[in-house]
Amino acid sequence: MHGGIRAPARRAASTLGGGRGFGYRCLMADHGVLLLGRTFGFRADPFLVPPEEAIEWRERGAVLMRGGLIEAAGEADALIVAHPQARRVDCGRRILAAGFVDCHNHYPQTRIIASWGARLIDWLNRYTFPEEMRFGDPAYAAAVAEDYLDLLLANGITAASAYCTTHPESVDALFAAAERRGMAMTAGKVMMDRNAPEGLIDDAQRGHDESAALIARWRGRGRLAYAITPRFAPTSSPAQLEAAGALFAANPDCAMQTHLSEQTEEIAWVRRLYPEEADYLAVYERFGLVRPGAIMGHAIHLEPREKAALAQRGAAVAHCPTSNAFIGSGLCDVAGLKAAGVEVGLATDVGGGSSFSMLATMRAAYEIGQLRGAALHPAQLFWLATEGSARAMRRPELGRLAPGAAADIVALDPETTPVLAQRAARAESPSDLLFALLILGDDRAVAETWAGGVAMKGGFG
Ligand code: GUN
Ligand code: ZN
């Protein structure tokens, strides 16, 4: 991690909606905390209105956090007058924005990020599956979960939808760690009953029963949500996908996450495994897995029918641009998906993705857009990384710098490295500044991360 900053892990959790408080924060919560700085949010989806009109920017803005929520956002002068007793935290010229939401990643792949030279199936067999085998050990799972959450917070990611492994222990470790930190985490046990090592697979019944037990144990606890997680069609038998569909039908408030049309070899494999289906998405449709709450990772090589069906059925796509470049998967048509009415969020896909930084992930999304001939506007990139991902996860309380939303906030500093500072000094508009930040920034540009109103990185109170 740059700068030796380590997130203050294992802090008492705050619960959204003003649940139990701990220690001094009980006292502080009476009047709230007023963050002062430049504020950046959205009035509208910048894919639906001209992006510049979607931006809500205040040079002297403020955000009042109380009870784990954003109570007010507006002009600093007005909020100081309205809330004279609130504790003030002056963030200077740093940019206060919604915390990043990463709608698809794999916490058990934290230790194998940046593994060389393989395409998807080979990468899974060579690096991923051997590492995931270790997560039956609760101590190992707990250690990686802590490092993973530290890395998320260091990068301003306050919420994520995470894959665990087939081991229920891996889910318990992540949820316990996230609950202690008061973080909004959606996660689930990978269901996988074929085409993977013996020690890593479950079976249709066990995958169902273990998932059901985890849902019963964790759903609705603190800020946690459960995602039914069949890895992808090649590693689940029809019986297992049917069990996943039954779970989703019985628990419609859960998310469902899987992978779709990431690489051409994978698509050919699915065609061989499910020759009776018209295309890849049809496999998931057959088992009731394509509907609101479904998050499809990647979705690069789609047929027109699949694109239309995603929109019509209300399933979302997690765009994973660093991963798509790193594993050589292809160029996702984000603008086309949005134009077709598909919900799209932005995701690191660590460890297929090559960075925990959502700034780097936005940069990769921009570059992939450029390679497709569609330059995404910085407002569109930040929106995908916040509200877009929150919508994909069906968690409307996340990803917005607005009253009523969770107090998950970042303070971004565009003066942390010489190259960024000199470019920021030349910025001609808020969106020009945001663009320089996402192209040149990394975790050093994240000065502070608040999760549920609690400062987790250590730069500011
Ligand atoms: N498809 C199935 N499993 C995975 C995974 O772990 N990472 C990526 N990038 N693609 C997958
Ligand atoms: Zn993935």
Image: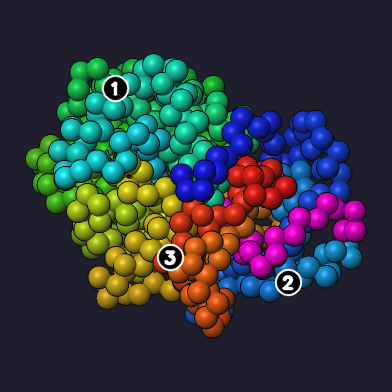
* N-terminal label among 3 and 2: 2
> Magenta region's main secondary structure?
strand
Find numbered disc 2 in the image and state the secondary structure of the residue it sits on: strand
- How far apart marks 3 and 2 lie (CA) works out to 24 Å
Task: Judge whether 272 appears above or below 100 on screen.
Answer: above
Extent of the magenta region: 83-99
Give the number of the mark in front: 3 or 1: 3
Question: Circle 2: is it few (<14), some (14-19), or many (20+) Cα within 10 Å?
Answer: some
Q: Which residue is mark 1?
A: 133
Q: Amino acid at mark 2?
A: Arg
Q: Identify the image quadrant of residue 199.
A: top left
**Residue 86 drawn in magenta:** yes
Does residue 227 appear to the left or right of 156 in the view shown?
Answer: left
Q: Does residue 421 show up? A: yes
Q: Which mark is residue 60?
A: 2
Question: Circle 3: is it few (<14), some (14-19), or many (20+) Cα within 10 Å?
Answer: some
